[in-house]
Amino acid sequence: MAPHQFPAVLFAALAVFLALAVPSLAGDPDMLQDFCVADYKSLKGPLRLNGYPCKKPENVTANDFFSNVLAAPGNTNNPVGSAVTAANVEKVPGLNTLGVSMSRVDYAPWGVNPPHTHPRATEIIFVLEGSLEVGFLTTAGKLLTRTVCKGEIFVFPRGLLHFQQNNGGAPAVAISAFNSQLPGTQSATVALFGASPQVPTDVLVRTLQIDGGVVEAIKAKFPTKY
């Protein structure tokens, strides 16, 4: 092989390696044992991990892998008319390192699960009752939307802004599944108007091209958490 050809071959081999490696890095890291039940008590100490440390195997019980958190409807008596109940590693310690979680979403008639993203997971939603108008926005600004009825599913790609709305006069229920033990949720409106410290009003005025008084009025509807 000519000397000047070697770097090109090496470069191609590196590109193939990265192409094969990236999918394995896209979700939660793989386990190195049968399970790693989250040890919540360890968070009181100095140890901090990307996830939770493991309980000692001899302290693990079947209840670490069980929860009835999704059994009861959420309270939809709120301004948006929806309630999300999560079954993630913070509620089910046995999910630690398994790379999956679920949520139950209850909708009042015409209720909305407002635009939001899950930075660490793709979501697949299954409609249990009613019908929903769902959609997500691509990075090119294209809206992909359709009606999803009882017994049907829809997929929201990881990190993309998406929403659901109950398009009927009766309550609706859906179950969401995620390829992460803790997918994270960032609401578009809360991020912009309820951050702490607050996003400067002038930034929002210039970004949204609206009056400062309107920005302040919207901020008043989203009190900061901290």
Image (spheres, grey):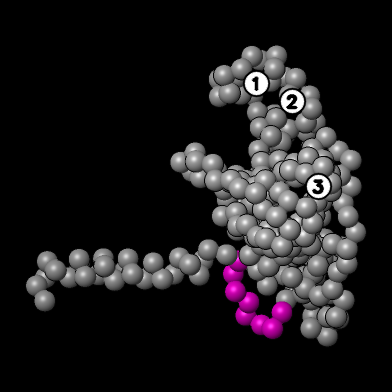
Which residue is label 2 attached to?
A: 219
- Identify the residue at horizontal 89%, vertical 47% (top origin): 75
The image shows residue 204, relative to residue 98, as above or below, that is above
Residue name at image x 63 percent, y 77 percent = 31
* Amino acid carrying mark 1 in the image: Thr
Disc 2 is placed on an element classified as helix
Residue lying farthest bottom? Answer: 58
Residue 187, quarter of picture: top right
Instruction: Please tell me which of labels 2 and 3 falls first in the chain.
Output: 3
CB-based contact (under 8 Å), mark 2 and mark 1: yes
Residue 107 at what x, y percent from top left?
81, 47
Give the residue number, with chain letter if any, for mark 3. 107
The residue at the point 75 percent across, 19 percent down is 217
- Amino acid tagged 3: Tyr
Q: Which of the 4 quarters of the picture holds residue 79?
A: top right
Kindly identify which residue carries mark 1: 201
The part of the chain drawn in magenta is 28-35
Which mark is in front, 2 or 3?
Answer: 3
Q: Amino acid at mark 2?
A: Lys
Between circles 3 and 1, the one closer to the viewer is: 3
Label 2 to label 1: alpha-carbon separation = 9 Å
Residue 30 located within the stretch drawn in magenta: yes
- Looking at marks 2 and 1 on the same chain, the residue that comes earlier in the sequence is marked by 1
